[in-house]
Amino acid sequence: MIDPVGDADRLARAEITRIAEPGDPVMGRLIEEYGAVGALAQVRRGVLEPEFIQAELELANAERRRPNLGQLVTGWAGRAVGCAGRAADDLAAGRLLVPGDPGWPSQLNDLGRLRPYGLWLDGEEDLRFACLRSVSIVGARAATAYGTHAAAELSAGLSDRSWSVISGGAYGIDGAAHRGALAGVAPTVVVLACGTDVCYPSAHADLFRAVRERGLVISESPPGVQPTRLRFLVRNRVIAALSRGTVIVQAALRSGALNTASHATALNRQLMAVPGPITSDVSAGCHALIREARATCVTSVPEIIELVGSIGDDLAPTLRGPSYPRDSLNEESKRVLDAVPARTPAGPATIASAAALPLTTTLSCLGGLESAGYILRTPDGWRLKPLPPTPDIHEKSASRS
Amino acid sequence: MIDPVGDADRLARAEITRIAEPGDPVMGRLIEEYGAVGALAQVRRGVLEPEFIQAELELANAERRRPNLGQLVTGWAGRAVGCAGRAADDLAAGRLLVPGDPGWPSQLNDLGRLRPYGLWLDGEEDLRFACLRSVSIVGARAATAYGTHAAAELSAGLSDRSWSVISGGAYGIDGAAHRGALAGVAPTVVVLACGTDVCYPSAHADLFRAVRERGLVISESPPGVQPTRLRFLVRNRVIAALSRGTVIVQAALRSGALNTASHATALNRQLMAVPGPITSDVSAGCHALIREARATCVTSVPEIIELVGSIGDDLAPTLRGPSYPRDSLNEESKRVLDAVPARTPAGPATIASAAALPLTTTLSCLGGLESAGYILRTPDGWRLKPLPPTPDIHEKSASRS
């Protein structure tokens, strides 16, 4: 098989994923300027090109950052020594997708110099294809039964409509989103903050196994790397960038899901939030996003698809209540019907007076209403026909998706 | 006691509340043009002034309406005969507040020619005072336990902060709103679609009795008048007009509460909606209002007061999650902390490499983190200190109000 990217570049990027933290802007620019091979050479030397340092410091100054480049490079150099020669083994053991590969999802380029150096893949699915029509569904680890139910229902509905679901594979909402997606037809993608061979959380081993068969488990980190708080946060930008929009199902006011939300907004992706009970702390973050108009309130799969889909062919139907035959009555009949008592029958004159209509008009309306089955004629006058049984007033356990 | 309005006007308006349906625009203009006494005289004659008919027909034509004025006046005349002389008894038995009275809530004048002819009051509270700082809380009769809980909590919180709660006294959300308000200090106002002496629904007899003692039961209809669908709908405009804003707590996609919502919007009052589970049909109307940006999503009393209160002194605090001491760490210490394994201890060199920091920097950070209580030094190296117990992840039964 021909390699459009070049073994050298792929090898260098594989090594860089071991040396630099994912999404490091300095490494991003270094690769932009000198390519992966050139960047790696400077890292190994432990010295960056003077003009790059110059430009980086000016940029940092403009952005009011105070980077310690020396320290950064020393750290990289130390890691480079530690992992010398491992990249070849890594590539032999795993698949590294790099920019320029046919399967590289071009939407990741929206991340600019925060674009991943490469993505380690586990699973047979084509990542680019899997993410063409995709939605991220993320949320709190400490989700409630309502939250996991909503996440699973929405994901299953999206997957049934050939929309891939992308999430972080965590406890709570993430896990429910992947499980729901597996119930549908579209592939689902887990973006990990650790090596794809590191099962975190370990309780999701079976889930990740199922995803590998039906989708992909991917990561910016090479095999064996453990997750850190920093890696969870930078991982979220990949989830947001891969998909057309992000749905926050449950999130406390301080939650990693809100970090993903910020990435989605920064990347001009659709940001959506699912409402919940105001008595639930894990919906407070969603309600804050909706209240501040940062996220759109979504309650069903069609509403989500309308926002992420192509204008025209993915419009959500406007929700309507049931329409009653009453609507077809003319104004006079409506007023007469309104004037007919529910229980104690009333005579035509009383009804005519209550309806503020002449007796003749009232009588003809009463006849029509009786034949239409709205009212009953009794020995004592007219009364309403008992209403049909009222619909179930309790919360349904099936979402409207 | 002097009567600033005049007995004749009050008497005429009392009789008109028996003759015309509340909020009839033709009667509204008739009173505008000729005063209540002049309007009543024409109604009794069964003939309207030609120039009024002329003007009314031109207006109707402009508004694409086809009113049957003859029929309307015939109906009024019929009722006038039926209730001749009752007005005096009604006024002897009850209190009728009319425009021009010191206690008349001037915000009702925003209704223009749909302004009530007068309001029948039952209760000792001053209506104008009671409605100065008031919010309407309305919603579905077929409310769920969550909905009535939310309505009662929000109302109690508003009442505690001296905000009156106005509602329709119906089953479900309305009743819960009044009950919650009674738990606070501010008066609550029931706006009925029937005479204030007609207890509808009858199961709310005790509730209305309590409201009369602590607030007001009011109606556009004179004593003895039964509710009709038409009267429920026109009643809603009074609820919306009396208050600074309307909160919809639960509403199906087709619901009378949405009628009140439309009135609030038409009157430039604040419209707010309380979110709920997406699995609940009685929250679907609220979510639609929020999604279409017709209503603001509110989840707590401060959020409501911020919208209806006076700019400046009623701002809701921005909700924030708990802040962790971690936030006070410097960048290097954070990166080192992120690099310290949760369980299996690691040596300083490993941690330095993971944090991409020099060993010396890492060692000093580790010392600081240990003394700050973040990490533990073990014979095999460093590991995170076990986290404090996680907060209750289940839905709290107390709202954030």
Image: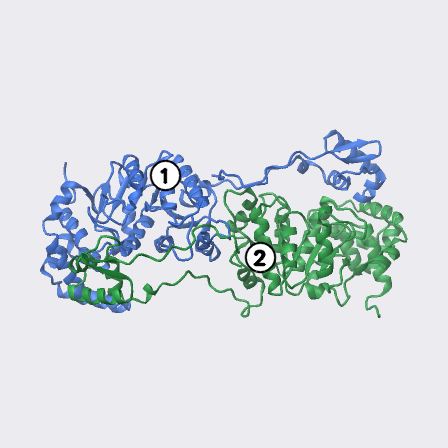
Chain colours: A blue, B green
Task: Please report the residue visible at 83 percent of the width from the left and 68 percent of the height from the top.
Answer: B3
Place residue B209 in its image quadrant: bottom right
Place residue A178 in its image quadrant: top left
Left/right placement of residue B401 relative to residue A301 reads: right
The tally of labels here is 2
The residue type indicated by label 1 comes to Arg
Q: Nearer the viewer, residue A361 or B282?
A: B282
Residue B115 seen by the camera: no
Place residue B241 in its image quadrant: bottom right
Can you say whether A272 is above or below B126 in the image?
above
Q: Residues within 10 Å of mark 2 (few under 14, many from 20)?
A: many
Task: Tell me how far mark 2 sits from mark 1, CA to CA.
Answer: 37 Å
Give the image location of residue B155, x and y in percent.
60, 57
Give the image location of residue B286, x and y in percent.
55, 49
The residue type indicated by label 2 comes to Leu
Q: Nearer the viewer, residue A277 or A25?
A: A277
Query: Mark 2 touching mark 1, by CB under 8 A?
Result: no
Q: Residues within 10 Å of mark 1 (few under 14, many from 20)?
A: many
Q: Chain of mark 2?
A: B
Q: Which residue is mark 2?
A: B154
Left/right placement of residue A222 relative to residue B84 reads: left
Q: Residue furthest front?
A: B379
SS assignment at label 1: helix
Left/right placement of residue B387 relative to residue A29 reads: right
Residue A147 seen by the camera: yes
Q: Which residue is mark 1?
A: A179
Task: Please report the residue visible at 22 percent of the width from the left and 66 percent of the height from the top.
Answer: B367
Q: Chain of mark 1?
A: A
Can you say whether A314 is above or below B100 in the image?
above
